[in-house]
Amino acid sequence: MSAPAVPLRLLIVVPPLAGHLLPARALALAWAARGHEVSWVGPEPALRPVLGPDAVVHPTGARLFREQAVGGAAAVRSLWEGFVVPHTRFTLGTVRRAVAQWRPDVVLVDQHSPAGALAAHGAGVPWASFAPSSLEIGDPLDGVPSEEGGGSDNGGGGLAGWRDGVLRGLWERAGLPAGQYTDPRFSPGLVVATGSAALLGLDAAAVPAAYALVGPLLAERPEPPFPWERLDPARRRVLVTMGTLSAEVAGGFLDRTAAALAELPDVQAVVAAPGEAVLPPGAIGCARVPVLELLERGAVDAVLCHGGMNTVGESLVHGRPLVLAPIRHDQPVTAGRLAALGAAVRVDFATATSDQLRAALRAVLDRPGYRDAAALLGRQLRSGGGAVAAAERLERFARAPHRTGPA
């Protein structure tokens, strides 16, 4: 009888944001179910409520980062200048210590946490990339000027070229050999992405061998209390959620949405909104709603959201069409693709009127083509295998022989 496989150690480096932590947590649970160990790097106040009291966390401490712009190229620049770069510099020392002391077999590096790749490469430890958004996959920034209005490109290459220069600067600042430069967003050996080829804008016949398109990473999670008894079985229901990063700018949009829904008496809204938000008649409003449980129970017929990959993926795997009002980062990319694929109606977050929002909601609720397209995309996403497939692929990668950077 052969000896059991030796358990592997996985270190996860992701931003302390729900849209990144939740799918990474699902992968970590699948990894642990295979008998392996996992630990995390990040601020405990942000990670602990999501990961639970038993998670192994290498604490970075917490700090405030610059507020990000709302949309367009300015939002992408501010994402990197105001968050990714300072977060990388702030956490790199802790990540290096975690790699040296905990001695992982593999490091899973979120594309917006380059410190993981820099530390792993420097220590000669294999690292895999984690892509929970569509912003860095499929070159959506190609041809986009680095400044609004087509301004300076800092030597050419537009926004993508500017971002590449930022990444090379992080590599140099980390003291890594320039001749060994590897884009820290893309591990040469494995990129775990939570989408499908269609959703990520990739040619299905030419997906790189290193890419594992596993679809949404879902797992049971603590859900807030919800008044299930208030759901009206005689009305169709729409879930309205604009995400944790958008509350400070969502007020006017939610007011217009409430006005639109007030003119749809056959539709009940479930709204994730602050307590002071204006709600349409008969709506259920909560500061937090159990999005995944609502979808799993078939309690909503359509979703209105900002286009974040978590909510989009969860909606699609349950066959629900969407109205998308993208704000920033990967949201416009995802919204454009879903609209082109016929699974969503895209509206303008800043300017959409209540009449336009009402028409968009009526379209996804009344026209079966939207639901059919959403169901097709959902089947494609589910075929990726989710968290179990991601853990299996990561295990194979960790056990394979590797040529790594300078130890």
Image: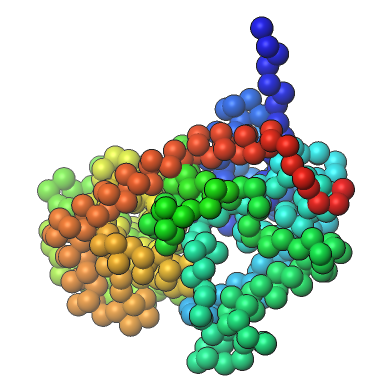
Residue at image location 87% in from the left, 48% down from the top: 407
Foreground pick, 112 / 268: 112
What is the tally of numbered marks visible in this picture? 0
Would residue 258 be visible to someone looking at this image? Answer: no
The reply, left or right, for residue 393 in relation to residue 198 is: right
**Residue 75, position in %: x, y?**
54, 77
Q: Residue at x 29, y 79 (%)?
A: 352
Please state if 109 lies on the left or on the right of 101 as rendered.
left
In the foreground, 40 or 8: 8
Q: Position of residue 138 (x, y in %)?
A: 49, 64
Q: Residue at x 37, y 80 (%)?
A: 350
Visible in this render: residue 231? yes
Residue name at image x 74 percent, y 41 percent: 402
118 shown above or below 328: above
Residue 62 falls left or right of residue 147: right
Where residue 76 sits in the image (x, y, percent)? Answer: 56, 75
User: What's the image's color scheme?
Assistant: rainbow
* Farthest-out residue, front: 205
Question: In the rendered image of this protein, does residue 387 appear above or below residue 311?
Answer: above
> Where is 83 relative to 205, above or below?
below
Residue 152 falls in which quadrant of the image? bottom right
Question: From the image, which quarter does the N terminus lie in?
Answer: top right
Q: Looking at the picture, how far across and down is residue 129, in whole percent?
A: 62, 52
Question: In the rendered image of this protein, does residue 46 appear above or below residue 279?
Answer: above
Of 251 and 147, nearer the camera is 147
